[in-house]
Amino acid sequence: MSLADVVAALLFLGVLAYAVLGGADFGSGWWDLVAGDATRGGPLRTLVDRVIGPVWEANHVWLIYVLVYLWTGFPTAFAAVMDTLFVPFGLAGLGIVARGSAFAFRKFAPTVATARVFGVLFATSSVATPFLFGAIAGAIASGRVPADGGGDRWTSWTGPTSLVGGTLAVLTCAFLAATFLTAEATRRDDVELAARCRSWALGSGLVTGAVALVGIVPLGRDAPTLFDGLTGRALPLVIGSAIAGIASLVALALRRDTIARAAAVLAVVAVVAGWGVAQHPWLLTDSTTIEQAAGARATLWALVATFAVAGVFVIPSLAWLFWLTQRHGWAAAELRHRRE
């Protein structure tokens, strides 16, 4: 493995982390949207606020990490991607800002009507943003980003592979979020809400699996390089993702919520990793390899060193944050606060 491959692998670790943590975060917005009116949807929205409130900003660390590593480690590819795909990237950025603002302002809305407006903005942004990221991934995977940029500003990210990628991104986020929310509702002894979230998780999991299966069909013509990789060297990961997804659904049906959550995470990691393996050695499919896009060796070594330093300080801090929010004492303190 070359130094450029090492840096590309480190970059892709950020993609995996954002797919799981950011995905569960974004997916909660979909269930917030369909939860019902203030009375029926109140418990779910309260759970969403309590669960993602402490971590929703931390999750975007991984998006920043990916963009910085792409920019500094593979500058020509970064320029080509941003030149061709600045429209979906710009819209996704607006979605992130709108989503975060609405999530924060909803808590302090003076009226129910105002809170409902902020809620709709939070939910719709939560759906649109992962769709755009999936469309961006589809554009890159289908070879619609030329090595020197200048690709079509609209058709580059609206082709069949992008539509499949965007749809799968939304569905995967919804499945992850429903699985996480089921486990959280169970941990907080809310039996009724846990049952509701479990039914959502089962339904969204089945739909996601069906769309993933059908979505392979257009890849053969629209993204042949990706298709060959997914049905070749990445096939074990694709099969592993399917097995993990089925295991998650079975665990949900058996009310083994912690196991279901772990299996859902494994399913997402495996399928996203399968995309990376299938596309290798291309950074921009059919136009630029990882080696061709790599920056100066000194820069690549600096990125490896930065990752090592960040691993010492950032990762333990994030792990501690997630551990704190998963403790029973955290949930008990929140319950006492609500009662007071």
Image (tube, grey):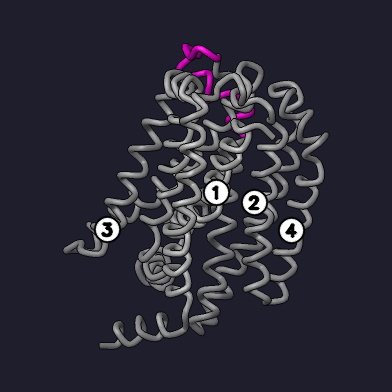
Where residue 185 appears, x then y in whole percent? 51, 76
Q: Which residues are magenta?
A: 147-164
**In the image as oriented, which residue stretches furthest toward the left?**
110
Residue at 20 percent across and 61 percent down: it is: 109
Of circles 3 and 2, the one toward us is: 2
Q: CA distance from mark 1 to mark 2?
A: 8 Å
Q: CA distance from mark 4 to mark 1?
A: 16 Å
Identified by mark 2, the residue type is: Val
Mark 1 lies on a secondary structure that is: helix
- Give amino acid for label 1: Ala
x then y, percent, for residue 199: 62, 67
Asked if the residue at tag 4 contacts the one at tag 3, i.e. Cβ–Cβ closer than 8 Å, the answer is: no
Residue for badge 4: 244
Q: Tell me how far mark 4 sits from mark 2, CA to CA.
A: 10 Å
Q: Are marks 3 and 1 in contact (CB under 8 Å)?
A: no
Q: Give the SS element for disc 2.
A: helix
Residue 104's tag is 3
Contact between labelled residues 2 and 1, with CB atoms less than 8 Å apart: yes
Question: Residue 332's quadrant in the figure?
Answer: bottom left
Asked whether 230 or 280 is in front, the reply is: 280
Please give the residue where the numbered disc 1 appears in the rendered image. Answer: 19
